Image (cartoon, helix red, strand yellow):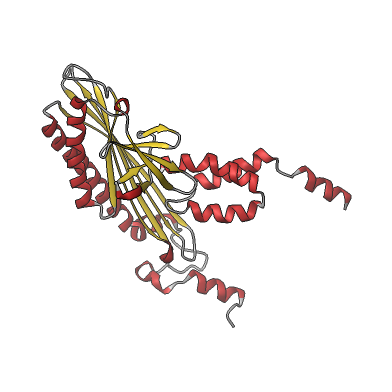
Amino acid sequence: MADEKDELQETELSYDQKKEIAKWFLLNAPAGEINYVAKDLKEALSDEEVYNEAAMEAFPVYNKSHMICLEMPSRVGDVIVSSFSEITENEYLDPRTAQVAIVDHVKQICTTVRPAYDEELPSSYIEEFRSALDADIQRYVSESYPKGVSTVNCVKGKDADGPGSDFELVVIITARKLSPQNFCNGSWRSVWNIDFQDESQVLDIKGKVQVGAHYFEEGNVELDAKKEFQDSTIFQSADDCAIAIANIIRHHETEYLAALEVAYSKLPDNTFKDLRRKLPVTRTLFPWQNTLQFSLTREVEKELGLGK
């Protein structure tokens, strides 16, 4: 008995280990589910100090990586929390309204807003390109994503006052469909970096799309699909650049979504078949044409003698 007690004492986790484990769970929560994870984690830890420190460190990272959208007070507008709009740890710029939102990361709310300072905003020359692109992206998002939001930030060269300078804009598109009562949640996140190169008169476009889905009724299935893109177009007027960039983004995202739909529609007929041996131990072919007749829950209950 003494040896067993010694072993238990040796495996006791340190404060830092508990905090890192807690952070891992929070950071890996699926879209829209971090508060559910936090609630269970708080109960499991039974240590308010460890939980609070882990939450203070994890929530800002999670919010920025998932690019959550928060409503600003007085219905001023919405702000997307991201590393591209970050001014300080709790301040995020909404260039569309020229407002800075002060965010409580753990509560995931915008507590107040203030007008952006001049040095936080792009020059009038850059704003012409930014606002034109923002308008075209808004139209695209409203047509393609029922619950989608977007923003366009300038991340390089925002002080350029006319032709002759390079600058970079970032398009962020985020959409979520949360239905925890139906045991499923999903998200779409895309980031497009547009590098305006004045000397070569070329726009270098790089994009990254991340699609997440979590289905947890009688199981736990999670999708995390990522895809990167690269394209280019010529440097034109602000309005023409906006149209060209929006069309490129629309093309790549629509094509990728269609490819995902095709791939997952073939799962029962192709992928799942390839994962399974031709003849199981029962020496009977699996009836792929009628998989609905099987219920994992029913079979487990039958084997365990439950429900009698």
**Residue in the image at 70% along x and 43% along y:** 13
Q: Position of residue 234 (x, y in %)?
A: 14, 27
Quarter of the C terminus within the rendering: bottom right
Q: Residue at x 32, y 49 (%)?
A: 74
When the figure is inspected, residue 268 is found, relative to residue 74, above or below; the finding is below
Which residue: 37% across, 47% down?
Answer: 70
Asked where in the image residue 278 lies, by quadrant, the reply is bottom left
Q: Nearer the viewer, residue 175 or 255?
A: 175
Q: Using the image as rendered, state which of residue 13 and residue 74 is in the foreground.
A: 74
- The quarter of the displayed image where residue 202 is located: top left
**x, y percent for residue 177:** 35, 56
In this rendering, position of residue 78 left or right of residue 162:
right
The picture places residue 20, in percent across and down from the top left corner, at: 60, 40
Q: Is residue 197 above or below residue 68?
A: above
Q: How many marks?
A: 0
- Name the residue furthest right: 2
Give the percent coordinates (x, y) of residue 238.
14, 30
**Does 129 sit left or right of 153 as displayed?**
left
Please give the name of the residue rendered at 36% of the width and 71% of the height, measured from the top-left corner: 290
Which of the 4 image quarters holds residue 112?
top left
Q: Nearer the viewer, residue 230 or 283?
A: 230
Left or right side of 262 for 222: right
Q: Is residue 239 visible?
A: yes
- Decide if residue 203 is in sight here: no
